[in-house]
Amino acid sequence: MPQTPPLRTLRTLSLSILAAAATFGCAYPRTIHVYDEECQITARQMVLDTTEVINAGRGCTVLERCAGQAVAEAALLAASTVISGSIVVAGNVVYWLEKKRDCRPKPAESVALDD
């Protein structure tokens, strides 16, 4: 029967992952406001932003370690992009439904024909 790792090991691993996320940068969702002229409202929209890489190659002395660090950074960014991208898609669906509900289309301009 396999042994479960002790709580201390799990805590250390969790803190390491959290520190890596804070150090390397990630993608995150952000809400912005845009004006929709057709509906005459200010609507919300979610976009995907990324943080800057803070620790770009610092402390890297051995080529293999640098390559490993680059792979870890890429994997972290890819994972955060997938998770945050899903949040952005779901959020934009909700905001689109709100926009459809609150939309007040401009009245059509009538054109007078001079004969």
Image (cartoon, rainbow, N blue to C red):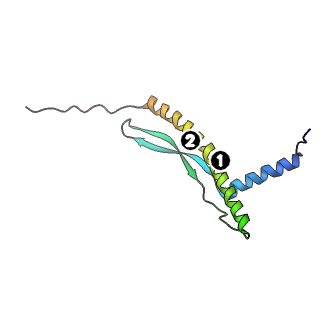
- Is the residue marked by circle 1 packed among few (<14), some (14-19), or many (20+) residues within 10 Å? some
Looking at the image, is 67 positioned above or below residue 98?
Answer: below
Give how far across and how far down residue 5 sits, in percent. 88, 45
Asked whether 76 or 48 is in front, the reply is 76
In this rendering, position of residue 49 left or right of residue 73: left
Q: Amino acid at mark 2?
A: Val
Give how far across and how far down residue 42 sits, in percent. 44, 40
Q: Quadrant of the N terminus?
A: top right
- Helix, strand or loop under label 1: helix
Q: Residue furthest bottom?
A: 61
Looking at marks 1 and 2 on the same chain, the residue that comes earlier in the sequence is marked by: 1
Q: Amino acid at mark 1?
A: Ala
Asked whether 69 or 105 is in front, the reply is 69
- Is the residue marked by circle 2 packed among few (<14), some (14-19), or many (20+) residues within 10 Å? many
Residue lying at 74% horizontally and 55% vertically, measured from the top left = 19
C-alpha separation, residue under disc 1 versus residue under disc 2 = 14 Å
Please give the residue where the numbered disc 1 appears in the rendered image: 79
Give how far across and how far down residue 84 sits, in percent. 61, 44
